[in-house]
Amino acid sequence: MPRNIIDVTDLTVEEIDQLISTAEDILANPAKYQDACAHKQLATLFFEPSTRTRLSFESAMLALGGGVLGFSEASSSSTSKGETVGDTVHTVSCYADIIAMRHPKEGAPFAAAQFSEVPIINAGDGGHNHPTQTLTDLLTIHREKGRLDGFTIGFCGDLKFGRTVHSLVNALSRYENVKFVLISPAELKLPRYVKEEALKKRGISYKQTESLESVMPDLDILYMTRVQRERFFNEEDYLRLKDSYILTPEKLETAKADLSILHPLPRVNEISVAVDKDPRAAYWKQVKNGKFIRMALILKLLDIHV
């Protein structure tokens, strides 16, 4: 049976560390990997819009010497004619060696994996999980801090629907001495099931607050998120909450000199463009890191050793 990555916890801590090590080697020695996936095909099945994730997967496979096929919206696939996602995936798995799939419904990649003859990577399913963004975040933290333990991370904004937050909390909860600060309006708090499974069961303490300014001096990492219009059931709630937290240079005046600011992107206005010039802003590095960690994951799932 093919190995699928639906949730970041499908990978052990040791495997994550190995992927980071491989990504670091790719960064240092890109030519060594340029033909690693020659004659292999990646299919990108994106039933939901994406820029960074889809293009980074495609860029990753091309940099490994492989090919890419797929679609970028559901309307350009046979699901628009009534074909089931299972049949679509089964069909595509006859043409490709590995599949990256994004879908607006939670659990869709897991269900689709039951019909695939090749490995499936969850590239985001609704408000549930986004494991490769989490691997990107972990690589970025490791490159910025030199470790994945012993720091305080603040998650700010939409913690309820933010699948990137859910995945990263789950991943970091398996490392030692990581302190979590959850910053959001009451309506967008981290879901109880995430807190129960990732934090409370492991005896990890966390702090919840509605004030970013009050905790800013304590943070080693600040993970900003977008309030996602597409996850809301009504426009009124979105408009009321969309500007809850906007990071500006003024709000960073009390932050540590070595703070790292992350954001999975896209952003709307939750980080002022003036912050882009701050040396603590790491979100554009994060974008670049996404390609290299996805290269490492593709190699792992295809069992290719360089």
Image (cartoon, rainbow, N blue to C red):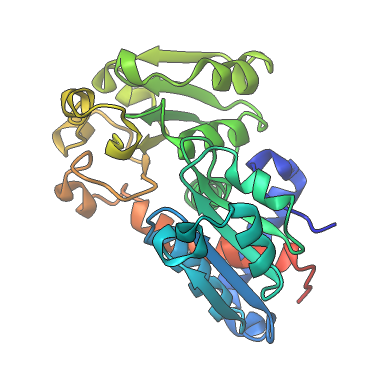
Q: Nearer the viewer, residue 212 or 87?
A: 87
**Residue 156's image quarter?**
top left
Q: Name the quadrant containing residue 93.
A: bottom right
Residue at (46, 55) in percent of width and height:
47
Where residue 275 appears, as percent x and y from the top left, is 20, 47
Can residue 226 be seen in this snapshot? no
Q: Position of residue 301 (x, y in %)?
A: 74, 62
* The C terminus, quarter of image: bottom right
Q: Position of residue 121 (x, y in %)?
A: 63, 55
Q: Vertical placement of 179 versus 149: above or below?
A: above
Apparent side of residue 215 relative to residue 57 in the rendered image (left or right) = left
Dividing the image into 4 quarters, which one contains the N terminus?
Answer: bottom right
Going 61% across and 48% down the picture, which residue do you hit?
109
One can see residue 164 in this view: yes
Q: Is residue 226 above or below residue 62?
A: above
Residue at 22% over, 52% down: 276
Q: Nearer the viewer, residue 144 or 227?
A: 227
Direction from residue 218 to residue 167 in the image, left or right: right
Question: Along the horizontal axis of the image, is 109 left or right of 55?
Answer: right
For this orientation, the residue located farthest to the right is: 1
Image x and y of residue 8, in percent: 64, 42
Quadrant in which residue 297 is drawn: bottom right
> Considering only vertical position in the picture, is 269 above or below 279?
above
Instruction: Identify the residue at image location x=53%, y=66%.
Output: 44
